[in-house]
Structures are given as structure tokens and as C-alpha cells.
Image: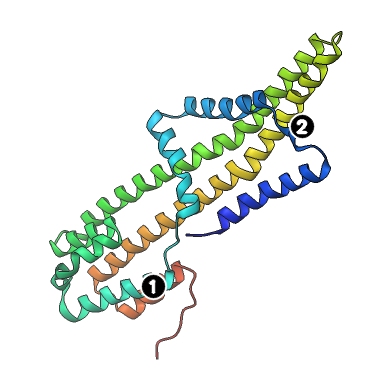
Amino acid sequence: MDPAAIIGILGAFTMVAVAIVIGGSPTAFINIPSVFIVVGGGMAATLGAFPLKDFIRGMVAIKDAFLWKAPDPIETVEFLSEIATKVRREGILALESEIDLYYQRDTLLGDMIRMLVDGLELEEIKMSAEGAIAQLEERLSTNVAVWERLGELFPAFGMIGTLIGLIQMLRNLNDPSALGPGMAVALITTLYGAILANAFAIPVASKLKKIRDTEVLYRRIYLLAIESIQKGVNPNILRQELSIMLGLEVREEV
């Protein structure tokens, strides 16, 4: 679990709340119609932009923004290098006894090693893996798109609420008691839209984008490792290549 997302988002809302409390009456910033306009309108419009299953999956993906843990790059390099070393010493069939371990780590890695053990050609393995990676990237990109759309629509519906409030105000200029509520809706909806977009939806989208890029990168690293193992590349060379891809310091082997 990476606490950065929780700390960042809660910190942003806390700073806004503190400013509101210090500046005056907090109740002045509570307006139920504004919540309906911004939250309800933004969610409904986003739903209209995606198939239902994609929208639901995208909303559920918010848990990943808070609970997802990035793989350990050093451990990954060592794990894959050990597989290459094992194959170099004992042959590809030696991997079959630990196939469950590879599936536990990652389904795609397990599938590729299974195909490798079964004697499939490298091109067949690559074709299958590339298809799986493309599907994963598309699915995770949809999650990102849902939250990016929310980040766009929350401020937009905030402006819609502003227009509604202004119209209500202008229609009741002869009634001073109606000016206050109309002005509240006009201003608070814009505030709600800006806060929800910049302190919530956009950070979540950015985190999901980071998750997508990392998950795809590691699947491509698994594919590179399988290619190298099948070609009989020296495990030390493989370790260096993987370290470069993951941005790790490459140490010269003595």
C-alpha cells in the first residue's frame, strides 16, 4: 500500500477545510443542490460516456489508487535472473516443477513459462503475450479515462450550477430574500467542481495512469526474460538488461 495518494488527497481537502473554518462560517459552504448538480451531474454524464461495465470497473478501480503496491524492481530482477540461471543449469523442463509459483506471481508469466515448457515456438509465445498485454493496457486505460472524464466534468457541472444560480438570481431581483440562495448556488457549485476535480478526480486518474504504465512495463519485462531464457542468454546479461529497463544501477559483474 502506497500512502501517498491517501495523504495527498486528504491533505488537499484538509487545507481547503481549514481555510474555510478560519475564514468564517463553515455552514455557508454547504449547499445540497450544488452537490446534486456537481456530483450527480458529473457521475451521470460520465456514465453516459462509457459502457456500463467499463464505468463500474473504472469506479471500483479507485481502490487501486490507495491500495496498489508497486512491485519491487530489485526483487523482480533477481527472481527472473534466478529462473534464467536454473534453465541454464538444468534445462527448460526444470521449470515445470515450480509452475504454480510462477502463476502465483503473475498469470501471464505462468502462461509464458507453461508454453515454454511445452515447447512452443518463441513467436507463438510472443504473439500470445503481446495480445494479453494489449488487453491489460486497454482495460487499465479505460479506468484512467473514467477518472479523467470525471476530472473534466466536475468543473463543467460546477459552471452549469453557476449559470443556474445566476438565472435564479436574475429572475428574483425584486425579491431580496431569493438573492442569497441563488448566489450560493452560483458560487458554491463552481467551488465544488474545482475541488472535486483538482483534489480528487485528477489525482486518482494520475495514480491509475502510473499503475497502468507500471503493470504494462512489468509484463513486458516478463516477456523479455522469457525471450532471453529461450534464446539461452547469459543470466548476467539478462540481469543487466532488466536493470536498465527498471532504471536500476547496473553493477559490473566481477
Q: Residue 58's spot in the image, x, y percent?
A: 45, 39
Name the disc covering residue 75, or none.
Answer: 1
In this picture, residue 139 sits left or right of residue 106: right
In this rendering, is residue 203 above or below 106?
above
Q: Residue at x 50, y 50 (%)?
A: 65
Q: Is residue 151 visible?
A: yes
Q: Residue furthest bottom?
A: 254
Q: Residue at x 60, y 56 (%)?
A: 7
Neighbour tally class for label 1: few under 14, some 14-19, many 20 plus, Cα within 10 Å: few
CA distance separating discs 2 and 1 = 53 Å
Q: Residue at x 29, y 69 (%)?
A: 228
In this picture, residue 109 sits left or right of residue 75: left
In this picture, residue 124 sits left or right of residue 196: left
Q: Residue 229's spot in the image, x, y percent?
A: 25, 70
**Foreground pick, 227 / 60:** 60
In this rendering, is residue 68 above or below 227?
above
Q: Amino acid at mark 2?
A: Ala
Q: Residue 60's spot in the image, x, y percent?
A: 43, 41
Q: Residue at x 43, y 68 (%)?
A: 72
Q: Residue 136's spot in the image, x, y percent?
A: 36, 47
Q: Mark 2 near mark 1, Cβ–Cβ under 8 Å?
A: no
In this rendering, is residue 163 above or below 109?
above
